[in-house]
Amino acid sequence: MTDREWYSYGEIRFSRSQILWLIMHLEFAPDGWPPEYKESGYVGGKSSRKQRAPFEMPACIWAELRKRIEATGQNGLWMEIVYSNPENYPWQIQHIANAMRFEYRTIERRIHTALRYVTGRRRKAISYREFRERKRKRPE
């Protein structure tokens, strides 16, 4: 599902794999950051002055993610539900499809469209509605 097992908050650029990783770790939002699961035995370190408080960057990233997901409305909520537990991906999409009385492929397509919008660079330039309409008009 994602390229890596862990990202530091300084590495987050809201790429597709990073968005999926963030969604899978939403339980740490908004106050913390998922710990890196490695044991190095290293206990010392160089002290440096930071420009920001240690909680500030993670809080900003979680807030930006929330804002991006909310911009996609119901489709973003479905995306969050499905990708928060990717092991149950097909089952969760089928469950949403049954509850909403849509076909499986319709829900899957809406979730993928929301993911493309959330990871897009031009996200602020156009609304989610405009993004979906442009996608429909594009020749395939």
Image (cartoon, helix red, strand yellow):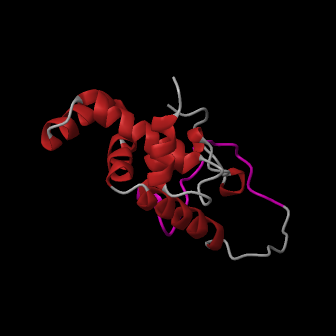
Which residue is depicted at the point 48% across and 67% down?
30
Which residue is depicted at the point 29% across and 33% down?
106
Q: Can residue 31 be seen by looking at this rendering?
A: yes
Of residues 92 and 127, the one drawn nearer to the viewer in this rendering: 127
Instruction: Farthest residue to the top: give it.
Output: 140
70 w.r.t. 136: above or below: below
Q: Give the side of residue 50 with respect to residue 33, left or right.
A: right
Which residue is depicted at the point 16% across and 43% down?
100
Task: Check if residue 41 falls in the magenta segment.
Answer: yes
Of residues 131 and 18, the one drawn nearer to the viewer in this rendering: 131
Q: Give the side of residue 40 with respect to residue 6, left or right.
A: right
Kindly indicate the quadrant of the structure image that contains residue 90.
top left
Q: Position of residue 140 (x, y in %)?
A: 51, 23
Kindly indicate the quadrant of the structure image that contains residue 96.
top left
Which residue is depicted at the point 44% across and 45% down?
114
Kindly indicate the quadrant of the structure image that contains residue 71.
bottom left
Labels in figure, total: 0
Residues shaded magenta: 27-45
96 w.r.t. 87: above or below: below
Q: Give the side of residue 99 with respect to residue 131, left or right.
A: left
